[in-house]
Image: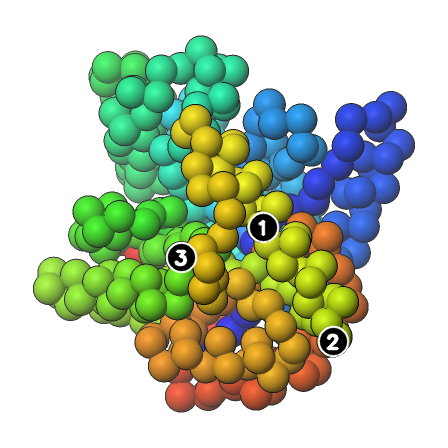
Amino acid sequence: MQFGLFGGARTKRSDGAADSHAYGDFIAYVSEAERLGFRSIFLVEHHFTGAGQISASLTLLAYLAARTRTMRLGTAVIVLPWHNPVLLAEQAATVDLLSDGRLDFGVGKGYRAGEFAGFHIPMGEATERFDEAIEVIRKAWTSAGRFSHHGKRWRYDDIVVEPQPLQVPHPPLWLAAGSPDSIRRAAREGYNLLLDQLGSIALTVERVALFREECRAIGRAYHPAMVGVTRALQIVRNEAELKAAYETRARVVRTIGDLARGGGTSAPPEHDDAPLLGTPAEIVARLAKLQAGGVENVLLVDPAANVESLRTFASEIMPAVADTRNASPLGSYRSPHL
């Protein structure tokens, strides 16, 4: 298995000093993760929450490009309906150049009603806006010279987008998906797949199998590194820590539900096996179940950005699930895309 990070820095409304410290701590956390052997970092994009979540993910990735040497730098995801696709293509290509070809471009159409309301964009337009934006971005990265685009939302005449990304034909595209239709779409349209942190082990294995089978059906080469499975990490050593971990898990699930479309799941299911929650041995057992189901690329979610948890994971858990049979070189993310 290979492991990466998912999420991002979390700040509080302040005069700026506390926010700067929070970002500094997060950058140190990512740098330590690279030293420990973590392969990637995927940053979220969120707005208007009041919870201090990252809003400018490409800006932070540009900085991380200078502070890291081997980690893949991903967006998970940029919500295309909110962005001018040409400006986004330019910004992402710049990060790809600055990182020496380490960008993974994860995109989605968004799911939080409050964010769409904040931008005065109807959620009902999300799919059509996403489809047109990704069409423009693909044109921007693959056209030989100038191009034009006349769509419903965007119109460009005889433009050339600069710079071009370093990866050819462009950075790998990742799609956040969960429903069977969206997973099939990811496979058919050349995306790699990002799966959420709430799905049970059984559901996650089903989704991976569906993506793999759809790739096979259309003749697309498949590699386990093409699927990133996010999992919350909570390492515990005793009963007191276990109780606190379950309380944290319940709070996180409630928050995710509250920020989604008009609310959502109020608590984790009774037998919630999705998080990597427990002692190192118990976490190894959950990872082994995922691995047996075809999961080889796990992205850890730790809102606290706890360096000690990372060190424990690297020393006590990673070695137990190492499997060189499906190991992929760092550059393998560059091949499984259009």
State whether residue 94 is above or below residue 81. below
Image position of 301 with respect to 216: above or below: above
Q: Residue at x 40, y 41 (%)?
A: 107
Instruction: Please tell me in which quadrant of the rendered image residue 264 appears.
Output: top left
Q: Amino acid at mark 2?
A: Arg
Q: Using the image as rendered, state which of residue 210 and residue 235 is in the foreground.
A: 235
Nearer-the-camera pick, 249 or 226: 249
- Cα separation, mark 1 vs mark 3, equals 14 Å
Q: Is residue 220 visible?
A: no
Give the spatial CA distance, label 1 vs label 2. Answer: 19 Å
Q: Would you call the spot at circle 3 few (<14 residues within 10 Å), some (14-19), or many (20 or more)?
A: some
Q: Earlier in the sequence, mark 3 or mark 2?
A: 3
SS label for mark 1: helix
Q: Secondary structure at mark 2?
A: loop
- Which residue lies under the disc numbered 2? 237
Q: Earlier in the sequence, mark 1 or mark 2?
A: 2
x and y, in percent, of residue 90 in the image: 48, 33
Marks 3 and 2, how far apart in space?
25 Å
Q: Which residue is mark 3?
A: 199
Q: Which residue is mark 1?
A: 250
Residue at the image point whose x is 41% and y is 29% from the top: 261
Q: Amino acid at mark 3?
A: Gly
**Residue furthest to the top:** 120
- Residue toward you, 289 or 251: 251
Q: Amino acid at mark 1?
A: Ala
Q: Is residue 26 visible?
A: yes
Mark 1 vs mark 3: which is more N-terminal? 3
